[in-house]
Image (spheres, rainbow, N blue to C red):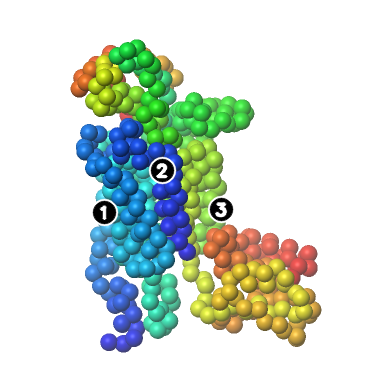
Amino acid sequence: MTDRDQVLASDGFTSGRRLVALGLMALGLLQGVVGLLEPRRFPGWQLFRRGDRFDYSMVDRSGRAVDVRDYLPSRAYWFGTRTIPIAVGLWLARTRPEMAPLSGSLVVWDGGVARRHRFLITGEVIAVDPPLAARP
Amino acid sequence: MFQYGLGIAVAWQAIDDIRVGIPRVYSGELFPWRPLLPHDAPVPAGAYSVLIGLEAIALAAYMARLRTGAAAALLALLLFLDNLVSLLNHRLLMAIELLLLSLRPVPGCAAVAGFLKHRLYWSLDCVRWQVSLVYLFSALHKLSSHFLSGEDLRNLFWQIEWMGWRRYPEWLSALLQEPSASQVLAWLTVATELTLAFGLHFRAAFGFLLPVAVVFHLCLALLMPFLWIFAFLCLVGLIAFLPNRIEEGTYEVHRAGKGGVLAVALALAWPGIVRVVGEEAMELGRWILVTPTGRRLAGYDAWVELLSLSPVGCLPAETLRTAPLRSLGGNAWRLLGLS
């Protein structure tokens, strides 16, 4: 084996590492494709693709106002998900049963039109009226 | 250089995670807003402390180049684990890039091989591929009427102000809520991402696309305060696309008298790469840069070459080499009689 061959081999140039690298590159592509086809269920490279305009009000069992920001990491990137107040409400009802039931309303602007949805969260059950339509 | 840049990004992200309250997501105090695990999946107590402790050790080893490949692989694994509880695109990209780098650690003795060193850095090919995938899929995700109409961007900017994360000047706030302006921004975003996904691979276009990428990421980070680390990570990613122009050996600054004081100061900042040599045959006050292969550069070209040797200057130097800037800079240098 020449010096050059030795360096190539020791640097992984001719070893199985290159095959692993190709596998990882293929996986990267697959992740991108699946993320594009199933954006709700699989993390893809969406990168600020989505922005929802919404407002909400929520109170707990004792009638105290609940601010979802108190229960989220500061600067958490969450404003692309208009259902986040309801998701936090559900999480609160499960982890802090003394706060349940939680109720409130969610106002969603879509194409400049505002629509109000009332919700009630009792433990495992969520009632949203009228139901929230999935966003395209 | 890319390796160190990535290490800095990982450290920055870890500090930011602690600052924004990710440890409290693990302890159950805060809502796990983007988990890959089910919301009520049990996370062992102290998991975050163990994770961040191991991350610090792996990062220190990685930066110190102690078993770099193993340290990078461990760091990637820890970042993947962290993402199970609180997925962040920044962290996911870091984890993937570290994993790819771990396959091809610091080269041993390329000089012995007798061929160009950059040929050995094949893991950077993988990093370039990954960066392109991110730009490409990010653009493809945005090909929806919601985004291209500018509505998503308007909503994002509105929410950022509503949350009190950034207070835009009044004129900017009005502009960002203007439908036609946000539509133009949306189209520009998609066009830039698509162009970068493919264009960065063309060496001739790289120098031109660099400032585009820098401006694009800086604008995004200025408008969206949570994107600074991602912007930094993407700019570090650009280093992977830099053509390897650095020659093996020592560069020399040849000066007559006290010429080229600034160049000498820069040269002294990179000991071992550049050394200063006095030359009597030259006009007093002048200086030139002699590369290891014997190229003698003066004026604009010498400055650009010197700049390209520094970790901070290598990216702008590539843009300064592009044909129009080189011609303009060279002529301006001569006209002004600069050395």
Name the residue nearer the viewer: A111 or B248.
Answer: B248
Q: Position of residue B294 (x, y in %)?
A: 59, 82
Name the residue nearer the viewer: B108 or A35.
Answer: B108
Q: Are marks 2 and 3 on the same chain?
A: yes
**The residue under label 1 is which amino acid type?**
Leu
- Contact (Cβ within 8 Å) of mark 3 with mark 1: no
Residue underneath mark 3: B211
Relative side of B265 to A68, left or right:
right
Residue B175 vs A99, above or below: the answer is below
Residue shown at the point (36%, 29%) measured from the top left: A71
Callout 2 environment at 10 Å: few (<14), some (14 to 19), or many (20+)? some
> In the picture, residue A3 is in which quadrant?
bottom left
Residue shown at the point (58%, 26%) measured from the top left: B174
Callout 3 environment at 10 Å: few (<14), some (14 to 19), or many (20+)? some
**The residue under label 2 is which amino acid type?**
Ile
Residue underneath mark 2: B18
- Please tell me which of labels 2 and 3 falls first in the chain: 2
Q: Quadrant of the C terminus of chain B?
A: bottom right
Tag of residue B61:
none
Callout 1 environment at 10 Å: few (<14), some (14 to 19), or many (20+)? few
Residue shown at the point (34%, 33%) measured from the top left: B30
Visible in this render: residue A132? Answer: yes
Residue shown at the point (34%, 83%) measured from the top left: A4
Q: CA distance from mark 2 to mark 3?
A: 32 Å
Name the residue nearer the viewer: B91 or A94.
Answer: A94
Local secondary structure at mark 1 = helix
Visible in this render: residue B182? Answer: no
**The residue under label 3 is which amino acid type?**
Pro
Residue underneath mark 1: A27
The chain identifier of the residue carrying mark 3 reads B
Residue B311 vs A5, above or below: the answer is above
Q: CA distance from mark 3 to mark 1?
A: 30 Å
